[in-house]
Amino acid sequence: MKLANVAGRATIVLSEKSGADVERASAGRFGPDLASVYRAWDDFTGWAASATWEEDVEFTPQDLAPPSPSPAQIFAIGLNYEEHARETGYDAPVDLPPIFTKFASSLTGPAGTIDLPEGNVDWEVEVVAVIGKTAHRIDSADAWDHVAGITVGQDLSERVRQFKGQAPQFGLAKSFPKFAPTGPWLVTTDELQDRDDLALGCSIDGTVVQDGRTSNLIVDIPHGIAALSEVVTLMPGDLVFTGTPDGVGLGMTPPRFLKSGETLHTWVEGVGTMTHVFR
């Protein structure tokens, strides 16, 4: 199942340009917003498994908003690919990689224009897990059962602010407006050929800069979610950015950052593609 946010309304995706409105299809039982669907995830998926969908919504990429537009929490796992850790000057973590947060005001959808603040803005493609059931102190073997699905994400980062001062400012440097694009929709993991081995990447003006696979994660998605849940309570709709592979601008020689007028395409195998232009 693919679930999109079309102008604030939960929509089952039936094609690249059309879908079925959840509230109308369920006669008001679910929706209209995505947050209420995640809060009733088990009931919703049970109903959806046998529901009949009638196409009644048309959309373009610009009509799509974040698949989880109002998460209570956004977590991100840093340095979670060995080669990415090395390219940014760190040793690969031997235990749980560093965890930081992005702020909800940085969320945006899968297409559009993003303003560049002063400094050096870098790209980081990530698979993003959307939590579907409350999780606290869960075992990694049960972690996928607490995930509604996955989506494509970019952890955009302004590197000057990130490394200015005595200690890194991960959260602030990664939370400028529209610095957390997600989309184009949520895909439930039963739709994926192998949810633990997904190709992900991004390109700038057609030149591929990142090309990785989640099978190379240091801490895989279920173990990362379980580790988070040892401390915090993950809630329906929460987002977990799971890490970026090597190929970021900071790791290039010389370093290379996004420029006005450039177009960033971001993709995850089996999920979809996002397109953003910078100015």
Image (cartoon, helix red, strand yellow):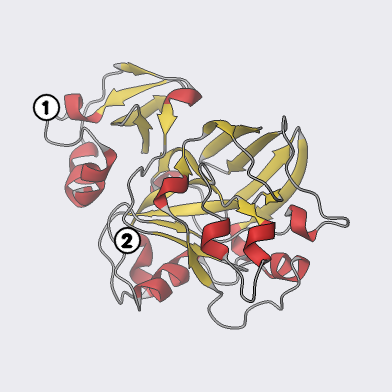
Circles 2, 1 touching at the beta carbon (< 8 Å): no
**Above or below, comparing residue 128 to residue 135 in the picture:** above
Residue lying at the far right of the rendered structure: 253
Residue 245 visible? The answer is: no
Q: Which comes sooner in the sequence, label 2 or label 1?
A: 1
Secondary structure at numbered mark 1: loop
On the picture, is 123 further left or further right than 134?
A: right
Density class for disc 1 (Cα within 10 Å; few <14, some 14-19, many ≥20) is few
Q: Residue 111 in the image: x percent, y percent?
A: 53, 30
Q: Nearer the viewer, residue 193 or 116?
A: 116
Q: Residue 249 in the image: x percent, y percent?
A: 76, 53
Q: Amino acid at mark 2?
A: Asp
Q: Residue at point 26% right, 48% down?
A: 38
Q: Residue 17 in the image: x percent, y percent?
A: 45, 20
Q: Amino acid at mark 1?
A: Ala
Q: Tag count in the figure?
A: 2
Q: Which mark is residue 27?
A: 1
On the picture, is 275 further left or further right than 261?
A: left
Query: Residue 20, located in which quarter of the rendered image?
Result: top left
Q: Residue at point 60% right, 62% down?
A: 215
Secondary structure at numbered mark 2: helix
Residue 109 visible? The answer is: yes
Indicate which label's residue lies in the foreground, 2 or 1. 1
| Pointer 2 residue | 145
3D distance between C-alphas at marks 2 and 1: 27 Å
Q: Which mark is residue 180?
A: none
